[in-house]
Image (tube, grey):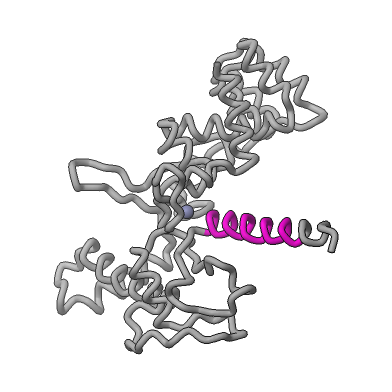
C-alpha cells in the first residue's frame, strides 16, 4: 500500500500533475489535497523522488525491509554505487539505528556546547514549497500558543540587533517602552507597501488605465499591473476542473492569457495573476499547443 502510494506520488511529482489540481507544489498537493501531515509529506516526497531513480527503494518498502521513516533518513545518501549495500545494512533496523548508519556515512562535527550567536542559515518561517533537503524536520519559529496568539522565535545577528535598537530609539517618542511587536508591525507595514508598489504599482499615483495598443515593450504599465493585482485579489488565478482555485500568494507573476508574443498588448482583460508554477504550466500548454498546431498545418498537403 505504502509502496504503491510512493510510485503514484513519484509519477505525480515527475509529471507535475499537482499543477492541474490547482496546487503550486508537490508539498501543497500532499498536505492540502491528500491530507498528509507536513512530516509525512516530506518523507514521502523525498522517498518517491529517490525511488524514481532507484526502484530498489520501492521494493525495500514493499517488502517491509526498510520503513518509511528510516528510508527518508537514508535517501539523501543513496547513490548508484552504494544503494544496494546501504539498503541491506538498513534492513530491519529502527529509525535510530538507521540514523547511526547515516551518521557514519556523513560524519558531522559534534554540536557545540555553547549557544551559537548566529544560525548557520536563515530559518524558514513556514515549510518551504518543495520538500526540504536534509534529514531533520525544519524548525518552525512561529508556533501557536493560544487562539490568535503565536510565539515568534528568531536567532539574529549582532548587526540586526543593533538595527532593532536603532528603530526602538527612533520610535521612542511614539513607543516609549520600545515594544517589539509594535515596532515590527510598523516596519512590516512600510515594507509590504513598498514591495506591493514595486511589484504591482499599488499606491503609486493613480492614472487612468491606458487604452491598450500594440507595443513591443514587455513592460506592463503601472495602472494595468495595479488593476490586475487588485482584481485578482493578490492570489494565483489558476482554477482546476473542479473549480478549485490555487491558494498561492507568493511568487506571483503577470501572465498574458494569449501570450504577449502573439498579442503585443498589455490590457487588463488580457492579463492575470499566476504563481510561478502555474505561469510556467500555462506557457507550456500555450506554446506547446501552438507548436503542435503549426506542425499539423505544415504536415497538411496544400
Ligand atoms: Zn498557482
Q: Nearer the viewer, residue 147 or 158?
A: 147
Q: Residue at x 41, y 38 (%)?
A: 32
Q: Nearer the viewer, residue 172 or 245?
A: 245
**Quarter-of-image position of residue 51:** top right
Q: Residue furthest front?
A: 302
Residue 161, image x and y in percent?
A: 36, 65
Q: Nearer the viewer, residue 87 or 115?
A: 87
**Region of the chain picked out in magenta, as a range:** 276-294
Q: Residue at x 22, y 76 (%)?
A: 171
State the quadrant of the N terminus. top right
**Quarter-of-image position of residue 147:** top left
Residue 103, image x and y in percent?
A: 64, 29
**Quarter-of-image position of residue 88:** top right
Q: Residue at x 33, y 50 (%)?
A: 153
User: In the rendered structure, does residue 287 fall within the stretch colored magenta?
Assistant: yes
User: In the rendered structure, does residue 285 fall within the stretch colored magenta?
Assistant: yes
Residue 52, image x and y in percent?
A: 70, 32
Amino acid at each position: 500500500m505504502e509502496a504503491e502510494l510512493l510510485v503514484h506520488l513519484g509519477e505525480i511529482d515527475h509529471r507535475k500533475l499537482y499543477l492541474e489540481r490547482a496546487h503550486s507544489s508537490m508539498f501543497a498537493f500532499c498536505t492540502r489535497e491528500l491530507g498528509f501531515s507536513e512530516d509525512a509529506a516530506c518523507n514521502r516526497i523525498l522517498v518517491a523522488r529517490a525511488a524514481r531513480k532507484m526502484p530498489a527503494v520501492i521494493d525495500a518498502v514493499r517488502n517491509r525491509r526498510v520503513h518509511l521513516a528510516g528510508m527518508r533518513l537514508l535517501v539523501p545518501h543513496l547513490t548508484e554505487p552504494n544503494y544496494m549495500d546501504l539498503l541491506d545494512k538498513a534492513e530491519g533496523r529502527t529509525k535510530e539505528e538507521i540514523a547511526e548508519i547515516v551518521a557514519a556515512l556523513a560524519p558531522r562535527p559534534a554540536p557545540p556546547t555553547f549557544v551559537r550567536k548566529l544560525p548557520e542559515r536563515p530559518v524558514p518561517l513556514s515549510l518551504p514549497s518543495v520538500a526540504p533537503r536534509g534529514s531533520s524536520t525544519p524548525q518552525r519559529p512561529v508556533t501557536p500558543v493560544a487562539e490568535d496568539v503565536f510565539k515568534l522565535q528568531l536567532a539574529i545577528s549582532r548587526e540586526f540587533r543593533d538595527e532593532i535598537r536603532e528603530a526602538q530609539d527612533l520610535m521612542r517618542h511614539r513607543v516609549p517602552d520600545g515594544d517589539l511587536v509594535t515596532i515590527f508591525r510598523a516596519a512590516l507595514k512600510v515594507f509590504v507597501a513598498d514591495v506591493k508598489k514595486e511589484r504591482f504599482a499599488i499606491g503609486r499615483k493613480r492614472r487612468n488605465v491606458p487604452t491598450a495598443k500594440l507595443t513591443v515593450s514587455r513592460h506592463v504599465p503601472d495602472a494595468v499591473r495595479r488593476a490586475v493585482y487588485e482584481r485578482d485579489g493578490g492570489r494565483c488565478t489558476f482554477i482546476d476542473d473542479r473549480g478549485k482555485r490555487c491558494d498561492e500568494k507568493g511568487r506571483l507573476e503577470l501572465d498574458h492569457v494569449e501570450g504577449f508574443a502573439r498579442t503585443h498588448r498589455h490590457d487588463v482583460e488580457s492579463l492575470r495573476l499566476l504563481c510561478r508554477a502555474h505561469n510556467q504550466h500555462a506557457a507550456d500548454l500555450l506554446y506547446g499547443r501552438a507548436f503542435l498546431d503549426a506542425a499539423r498545418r505544415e504536415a497538411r498537403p496544400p
